[in-house]
Image (cartoon, helix red, strand yellow):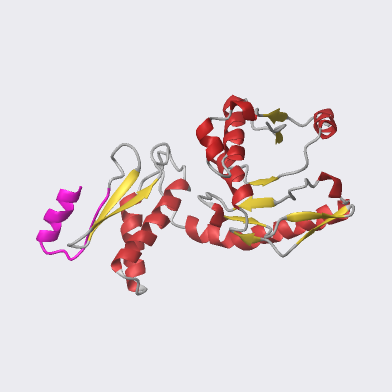
Amino acid sequence: MKEAAQRIHQLGSKTVVVKGGHLKGMAIDIFYDGRHYHELRSSRIETKNTHGTGCTFASAIATLLAAGDPVSEAVKKAKTFITLAIQAGLPLGSGSGPTNPFAFVLREMERYRVIQELRRAMMLLREEKVGSLIPEVSSNLGYALPYAEGPEDIAAFPGRIVRLGESVVSVGDPEFGASQHIASIILTAMKSHPEYCSAMNIRYSRDNVARLRGKGFLVAHFDRRREPKRVKQEEGSSLEWGVRDVLKRARRIPDFIYDEGV
């Protein structure tokens, strides 16, 4: 790919982009400006709806250039744009469906709705006086945008949700990127179940687990004694590992996941 970019550059193009979407492994494109190579990486998306991928990518670059972005920045943003368009590809017809170029705009529109839903949820938690369900380390409630890729795509409450007598309070309104902790749990679940885009941590007790099972909820747990040493050494990775471990073993995604500590 680098050799191809160099040869094309020698033909007169000031900058070159070589797509690598048909190769195995990560979806890596190469950007070459005549002096440096830049790799544009994204995870490979398992879908047959990729019709128009190159056209959408090129059109996004052209639009961003017309808007005044430098070439390198336009290509980088277009990579993000096309990745989301592929993730939201449309299953039309009996063959390969098209990418969805509206996915980026639709996801941005979801930001307002996500914040409003979290505000409504917080009002409900206050009204129901669920202070006894808040653990000593406090709680948080997160809600992800469609096709979330990182904590910046997940809204939560800054400073967490804390107990105040029988009720709960939050330091401020929900914000995107406010919680790495709850975001890692949601992102782990969304990898295999994209529709599960919200989660909250509550206080563990045997009585609570018994009540949940009595109400018909599917409850699962993980054992931290089985946690790999490398995960224990990485700060904040235990819950992510635990959720992933449960989802691998579960026939369907549980309503609640708990652990009893080490």
- Quadrant of the image for the C terminus? top right
Residue 26 visible in the shown view: yes
Q: In the rendered image, which quarter is residue 67 located in? A: bottom left
Estimate the x, y position of residue 58 in percent, counting from the top left.
31, 59
| x and y, in percent, of residue 78 in the image | 37, 59
Residue at image coords 42%, 36%: 94
Span of residues in magenta? 1-19
Query: At 35% across and 42% down in the image, what residue appears?
Result: 26
Q: Nearer the viewer, residue 24 or 54?
A: 24
The stretch drawn in magenta includes residue 3: yes
Relative to 260, residue 179 above or below: below
Q: Residue furthest left?
A: 11
**148 to 253, vertically: above or below:** below
Name the residue rendered at 42%, 57% in the picture. Answer: 81
**In the rendering, at what x and y percent does residue 216 appear?**
80, 29
Left or right: residue 79 compared with residue 197:
left
Q: Residue 177: which quarter of the image?
A: bottom right
Q: Position of residue 213 (x, y in %)?
A: 80, 29
**In the picture provided, is 130 more to the left or to the right than 145?**
right
Left or right, 246 with respect to 97, comes to right
Total residue callouts:
0
Q: Residue 244: within the magenta? A: no
Which residue occupies the foreground of this view, 233 or 211?
A: 233
Whether residue 193 appears in this view of the structure is no
Using the image, determine if residue 113 lies above or below residue 24: below
Asked whether 31 or 237 is in front, the reply is 237
Residue farthest to the bottom? Answer: 68
